[in-house]
Image (cartoon, rainbow, N blue to C red):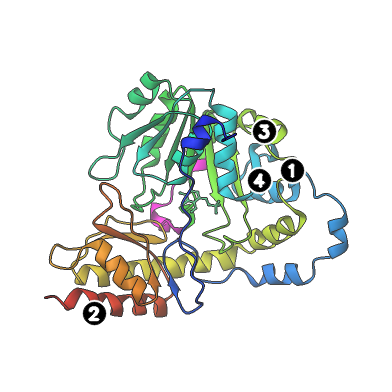
Amino acid sequence: MSYERPNIAQMQGYTWGEQPADARTLKLNTNENPYPPSPAVGQALRTFDADLLRRYPQPTADPFRDLVAAHFGLERQQILVTNGGDELLRLAFTTFLSPGQPFATAAPSYSLYPVLAAVADAPVLNIPLDDHWQLPDDFVAQLNSAGAGLCALVNPHAPSGVLMPLAQLEAVADEFDGVLLIDEAYVDFVDPDAAQETTALLQAHDNVLLLRTLSKGYALAGLRLGWGMGAASLIEPMLTKTRDSYNINAVTQALAAAAFADQAHARDSWTRVRNERARLADALAELGFTMPTSQSNFLLAYAPASVPAAETLYLGLKARGILVRWFNQPRLRDALRISIGTPEENDRLLSVLRELTSHQD
Ligand SMILES: Cc1ncc(COP(=O)(O)O)c(C=O)c1O
């Protein structure tokens, strides 16, 4: 006999990116930063006083909230610190969706969203992006007519990497009757001349929630620290009601502060990733791949018809110790999503791809 709620019994769980046991495997499948975190993180870890672990941590991670608030010109009350960006997503579902109310997103999108919707027993409204990976004109009309309570949009978009203009997001925020969560997990990698000040949206919109994380831009996926930014009225119920009582442990709080304080180190890695993104995109184009313009730390590379299918390339790379992501989904089946590595890693990927695309029977 199953004791699960019916929706839990029926749902599929999240599929994690593959984690190779062999350290020689080149891991370009989960969009981690190829460069190390700030040396200040290692220093904070080495000097952390274990005696502090006797006590509970500061319950709302206020020192980190204050760092973020000062950086973005916001108030502490506008910041919520979470156990990875993923916890913020979970809290948004718990806090803003009524039972049975639809969750909406622009498809394709982050594969965790439908999982969280299934846990919440919420119907999912998947509105396809247009051919340029942008929102269709009637996007908000569709949200409102379905009565969606929460809409999540990844920007820069995953898995295409395409950046959606701020004006479009603002138009959605203006008209939408629910909460608009803008998932900015990859925003640190946007070219400086294309960067948009999304925090400006928070001044006039009490229904906008921005998601940020240390996982990608700060090379700390293993630390599990993210945060939300929004109107104090949006943050408050998650902070005081739906969140776990001590969701950020003391070690994470200390290391996160060290990482965020070293902006110069993080920025340097963003520049290096951007430079490699441009070089890898050019090299893949020479091999015949086509890609939407990525403002993220990955490329969605569509295989040309003249070479083996994307799935075959994915398996061929894997057999040679290189992991990339292949999605068996409409619109993505012909593409590989490749995280940007270091120059040496990208060279290794390119040389194997050259081999796989040139030996044709
Ligand atoms: C689109 C998107 N949003 C949010 C996250 C959450 O990241 P984390 O929980 O590591 O902060 C990820 C991680 O891969 C992601 O791809």
Q: Secondary structure at mark 1?
A: loop
Please name the amino acid that badge 1 sits on.
Thr
Please state the extent of the stretch shown in magenta in the rendering: 189-199
Closer to the chain start, of discs 4 and 1, is: 1
Q: Residue at x 64, y 64 (%)?
A: 262
C-alpha separation, residue under disc 4 versus residue under disc 2 = 45 Å
| Callout 4: CB less than 8 Å from ligand 1 | no
Which of the pair 316/72 is nearer the observer? 316
Residue that mark 4 sits on? 81
Crowding near the residue tagged with mark 4, few <14, some 14–19, many ≥20 C-alpha atoms within 10 Å? many
* Placement of 353 over or under 195, stated as above or below: below
Please name the amino acid that badge 2 sits on.
Glu
Closer to the chain start, of discs 1 and 3, is: 1
Please name the amino acid that badge 4 sits on.
Val
- Residues at discs 3 and 4 in contact (Cβ within 8 Å): no
Q: Secondary structure at mark 4?
A: strand
Q: Residue at x 52, y 36 (%)?
A: 8
Closer to the chain start, of discs 3 and 2, is: 3
Residue that mark 1 sits on? 60
On whether residue 34 falls in the magenta region, the answer is no
Q: On the rendered structure, is 102 left or right of 141?
A: right
Which of the pair 258/113 is nearer the observer? 113
Which of the two marks, 2 or 1, is nearer to us in this view? Answer: 2
- Residues at discs 4 and 1 in contact (Cβ within 8 Å): yes
* Placement of 158 over or under 271, stated as above or below: above
C-alpha separation, residue under disc 3 versus residue under disc 2 = 52 Å
Residue that mark 3 sits on? 242
Closer to the chain start, of discs 2 and 1, is: 1
